[in-house]
Image (cartoon, rainbow, N blue to C red):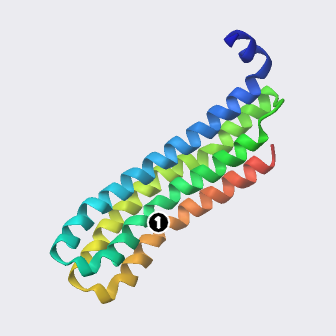
Amino acid sequence: MFKYVLENNLGDVLAIIGAALCFLLAGSGAAKGVSMAGKVGSGVIAEDSSKFVPVMILEALPSTQGIYGFVVAFLIIGKVGGLSLEQGFSLIIAGLPAGVVGLISAIFQGQVAVASIGIVAKRSADMVKGVVLTLMVELFAIFALLISILMVGKV
């Protein structure tokens, strides 16, 4: 059975692998980034519970890379059905920008979010400055998302 699937649906199998890789990479980075910010944020909230909302906003920012990986994986899965070997390989490649950049940028964004939570700990009124700094890393994940969407659209 497995041999039959590989021989007759290898393009589809490759596309599914591409979708899985895209989400696994981006989702793992997002989870790491959010957890780093959450650990530091918990300490700030323990000292002053009124800072929960600004800390939560900063903690949530690295999660967007996981969303981007999900979107691209969803688009790739939407292409599954009678794909050729070349199309399957193309869809693996199409998922890589969102997956790899999502992994790396979410971790870096988590590091900036951690530092920005330090801003909130000292001066809650300056939270927006921390958000802007954290969103600068997001820009590269957005570029990767757009590239992946364009690549999926060409298959």
Q: Outermost residue toward the left?
A: 47
Name the one closer to the observer, 154 or 19.
19
Total numbered badges shown on the rendered structure? 1
Residue beneath the point at 76% across and 43% down: 78
Which residue corresponds to mark 1? Answer: 137
Residue beneath the point at 15% across and 74% down: 47
Give percent across and percent down for residue 153. 79, 50
Residue beneath the point at 41% across and 51% down: 31
Give percent across and percent down for residue 139. 54, 67
> Toward which corner of the image does residue 20 lie, by quadrant?
top right
Q: Is residue 108 left or right of residue 66?
A: left
* Residue density around tag 1, few if under 14, some if 14–19, many if 20 or more, within 10 Å: some
State whether residue 154 is above or below residue 61.
Answer: above
Q: Is residue 43 left or right of residue 11?
A: left
State whether residue 122 is above or below residue 27.
Answer: below
Tag 1: amino acid: Val
Q: Outermost residue toward the bottom?
A: 125
> Toward which corner of the image does residue 3 lie, by quadrant?
top right
Residue beneath the point at 76% across and 14% down: 7
Give percent across and percent down for residue 140. 54, 62
Of the 4 image quadrants, the one containing the N terminus is top right
Q: Is residue 70 left or right of residue 118?
A: right
State whether residue 51 is above or below residue 6.
Answer: below
Q: For mark 1, give the secondary structure.
A: helix
Give percent across and percent down for residue 76. 71, 43
